[in-house]
Image (cartoon, grey):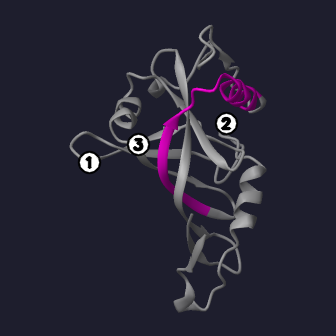
Amino acid sequence: MDTKNLAELYHLPTMDWAAVQSRLDQGFPQAPSTGGPDRHTCWLTTLNPDGSPHVTAVGAIWADGAFWFQSGESTRKGRNIALDSRCALSVATDQFDLVIDGDARRVTDPATVAARARRWNEQGWPARVDDSGLALTAEFNAPSAGSPPWFVYRIEARAATALATVDPGGATRWRF
């Protein structure tokens, strides 16, 4: 991993990737009144066919050292990822703001899909694996997710940038 201190100019310390991961492992609930300033929101950026960015909020989770999200195939983000897997995901925690650059890959392993369904359940979304074993369904989802089935995607990170929001401050970029 290549680490670059982006706040060296201000004599601020390099942030520690292990500390960032540790904070992400604690979770970042996205229901109202569960984070800062009032909740956490994950923003996913994909590329439209013309190369312009498409940004949308997603109910992403952090598990097994990666970000995961779900979407229907017919949504803009689903269609964009099918054409070009490059994406970015951002989230603000109380300790730092974070952007992950990488590639979104649709998960085709039934055990992994089931594990992610369990994780979303733990966070309050009653997702379950559908009859195919490869997608999720539930009584509800975000309107931007489209109709079920919802496929699970894992973001394979190429780089991450964090900006500390607490003392001593700092900004760091990691390339994996």
> Of circles 1 and 3, which is in front?
3
Query: What residue is rendered at 59% in x and 17% in y?
Result: 140
Q: Is residue 129 magenta?
A: no
> Of circles 1 and 2, which is in front?
1
Disc 2 marks which amino acid?
Ala
Q: Is residue 9 above or below residue 146?
A: below
Q: Which residue is mark 2?
A: 31
Farthest residue toward the front? 109
> Of circles 3 and 2, which is in front?
3
Per the model, the C-alpha gap separating discs 1 and 3 is 14 Å
Question: Which label belongs to residue 52?
Answer: 1
Farthest residue toward the left? 50
Q: Which residue is mark 3?
A: 85
Query: Which element is circle 2 on?
Result: loop
Query: What residue is rendered at 70% in x and 30% in y?
Result: 120
- Comparing 65 with 76, the one in front is 65
Per the model, the C-alpha gap separating discs 3 and 2 is 28 Å
Q: Describe residue 75's horizontal placement relative to residue 158 as left or right.
A: left
Query: Which element is circle 1 on?
Result: loop
Mark 1: few, some, or many residues within 10 Å (few <14, many ≥20)?
few
* Image marks 1 and 3: residues in contact by CB distance under 8 Å: no
Q: Which residues are magenta?
A: 97-121
- Comparing 116 with 176, the one in front is 176
